[in-house]
Amino acid sequence: MTKNFFKIMGIILGIFIIGNFIFYYGVDKTSPEFTDMGWFETLVLLMSLVTGSAVDQFIICGIAFYIIQFLNNKEILNFNDKINIILGYVLSVVINFGFRFFYLERMDKEIMNFENIFITVFVPIIYSFLMFRIVKRFVKK
């Protein structure tokens, strides 16, 4: 178990570092909240965004992967695990976009900027790996 745990934690840390690299160099440095932000600060920001949205992401990713697993059990879809992870991730991102854009529109915030799109796409990555394993374990044929 310990070897598997460290392998998963290494993959999650690698995803955070790659995501932080993209976010740090893609963010608009002229906006006031990102003007003086360094590389480590953006890494902490991404980690806090992923941690802060745990409940809603578990629900969204859980629903997405339950749908994928249900369709596999009914033999409507018949893909391997790698394709199922990608399908569940894409479905959770679509659901996430809908909720996030509805929420931002209600608050009269800008919807189509790099930060909002990146966060909406990045956050479900971590939860997709976790929820795929959880849903697959509990939903049997």
Image: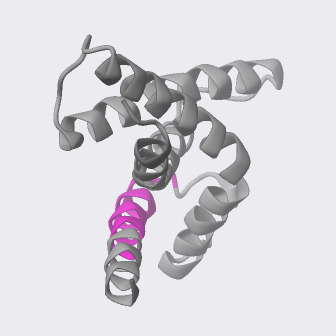
Q: Foreground residue, 99 or 108?
A: 99
Dominant SS type (magenta): helix
Q: Quadrant of the N terminus?
A: bottom left
In-image side of 38 versus 132 (left or right):
right
Colour logic: one colour
| Residue 93 seen | no
Residue 81 % position (x, y): 22, 42
Q: Foreground residue, 60 or 65?
A: 65
Query: What residue occupies the far bottom of the structure in this picture?
Result: 2
Tell me, yes or no, whether the highlighted magenta stretch contains residue 25: yes
Residue, x 65% and y 29% (percent of image)?
Answer: 100
Query: What residue occupies the far right of the structure in this picture?
Result: 107
Q: Foreground residue, 83 or 126?
A: 83
Q: Is residue 32 above or below residue 103?
A: below
Q: Quadrant of the C terminus?
A: top left
Tell me, yes or no, whether the highlighted magenta stretch contains residue 22: yes
Residue, x 66% and y 65% (percent of image)?
Answer: 48
In-image side of 113 versus 54 (left or right):
left
Q: Which residues are magenta?
A: 13-28
Residue 132 % position (x, y): 41, 45
Q: Is residue 66 above or below residue 53?
A: above
Which of the 4 quarters of the picture holds residue 90?
top left
Residue, x 31% and y 29% (percent of image)?
Answer: 87
Residue 99 % position (x, y): 66, 24
Residue, x 69% and y 58% (percent of image)?
Answer: 33
Which of the 4 quarters of the picture holds residue 9?
bottom left
